[in-house]
Amino acid sequence: MTDHPATTQAHTTPSAPQARPDQQFHSGEKQLRVAVAVDLRESLCRRIEELEPRIELIRDHSLYRPMRGPADWSGDPEHTRSAQEQEAFDTMVDSAEALFGIPDVDPDALARTVAQNPQLCWVHATAAGGGSQVKAAGLAREALDRIDFTTSAGVHGRTLTEFALFGLLAGAKGLPRLQEQQGRRHWSDRWEMKQLSQMVVLVVGLGGIGSEVAATVSALGATVIGTSRSGTPVPGVDRLIAVEDLPRTAPTVDAVVNTLPGTAATEKLLGEEFFAAMSEEAIVVNVGRGTVIDEEALVEALDAGRVGFAALDVFAVEPLPESSPLWGHPRVLVSPHTAALNSGEEERIAQLFAENARRLLDGEELVNLVDTIEFY
């Protein structure tokens, strides 16, 4: 990054272990000691300190794996630390009561610091799906109960909604057919394109992203059906259904947008039964997690004409294997999990972190707490 010095020495000297923060947060004197565990640019470190002055934010920019682009939290994989640098990095994160980011976005590094740092009480993951990273760390139940884990869910709502809208319109307007004809320089007879305003769109998952997708396509005139466990009304959603009703609902919709996280309960939720029931030439968009869609069943539905177009930003295995038939399918748009990437993401995550720090210090419930049973 370009706006910070090589190091911020005033913030790098670890202090001796302190009592758990939640024992002292309400004394009016306690500061929350936070270690920045990923490459957050200095201007945003200072912004967090401005938004929540009770934070003692320690960081050393010389120790991070540098970003290769916006919100590249895991950093350059070619960058390596010396043994001395690694020791300094570990000492820094082990001295904190809270972490901005999972160290190096590495579940093994998270497991290491949790084991070494009994005063750690809060970890904020920079990913919307940070629950999967916590699960991959294989933490003991004691640690999962001791530490609050939060994610950055919601900060990608607008960018992913725009990709979902792009996918819906690309399918409705016959993008594959247009590209194929243009490649052959063929001027065909005219044909009627679908209208989003006349479509029924099923939004699977009505969290932050799904709710924004629903509101956006509803504003453009679409009829929206959404899945819900609570039955609580959501703006822009005309009808709520239970997840169990997905196969019965499939024949009635023109398009489906998945926004669900990847959990044991959602794995291949949109599978053979669902795709077999879809109406002809339906549109499928996935901006949730790749594991929610049974990709083999989706390919079968594409070949059978039940799905006319699929815009996929996420996949069950990433990077998508070269052997996957999705790569070469003429009616599939493959996006390399990049739809959420935006230069404003880092600032939104920093603001979310500062708000959650305020909540922690004031004894309020944190936003985006990870369910440590299902890890979402």
Image (tube, rainbow, N blue to C red):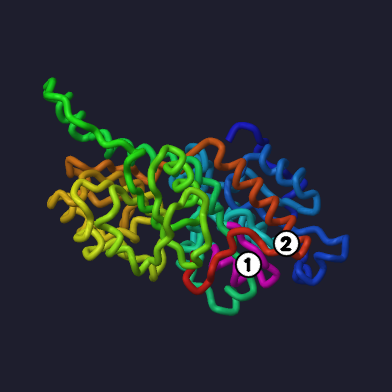
Q: Residue at x 65, y 52 (%)?
A: 353
Q: Is residue 143 left or right of residue 105?
A: right
* Position in image of residue 305 (x %, y %): 15, 49
**Which residue bears the numbered disc 1?**
148
Alpha carbon distance from label 2 to label 1? 10 Å
Residue extending farthest to the right is: 28
* Position in image of residue 284 (x %, y %): 29, 49
- First in residue order: circle 2 vs circle 1: 1
Q: Nearer the viewer, residue 264 or 85?
A: 264
Tell me if residue 223 is in the magenta stretch.
no
Q: Is residue 205 left or right of residue 191?
A: right
* Position in image of residue 191 (x %, y %): 17, 29
Count of residue discs: 2
Tell me if residue 119 is in the magenta stretch.
yes
- Quarter the N terminus occupies: top right
**Which residue bears the numbered disc 2?**
360
Stretch of the chain drawn in magenta: 110-124
Report if residue 260 is visible in the image: no
Q: Residue at x 12, y 24 (%)?
A: 189
Q: Is residue 306 left or right of residue 5?
A: left
Report if residue 375 is visible in the image: yes
Q: Nearer the viewer, residue 82 or 173?
A: 173
User: Local crowd at mark 2 within 10 Å, few (<14), some, or many (≥20)?
Assistant: many
Question: CB of mark 2 within 8 Å of CB of mark 1?
Answer: yes
Amino acid type, mark 1: Asp
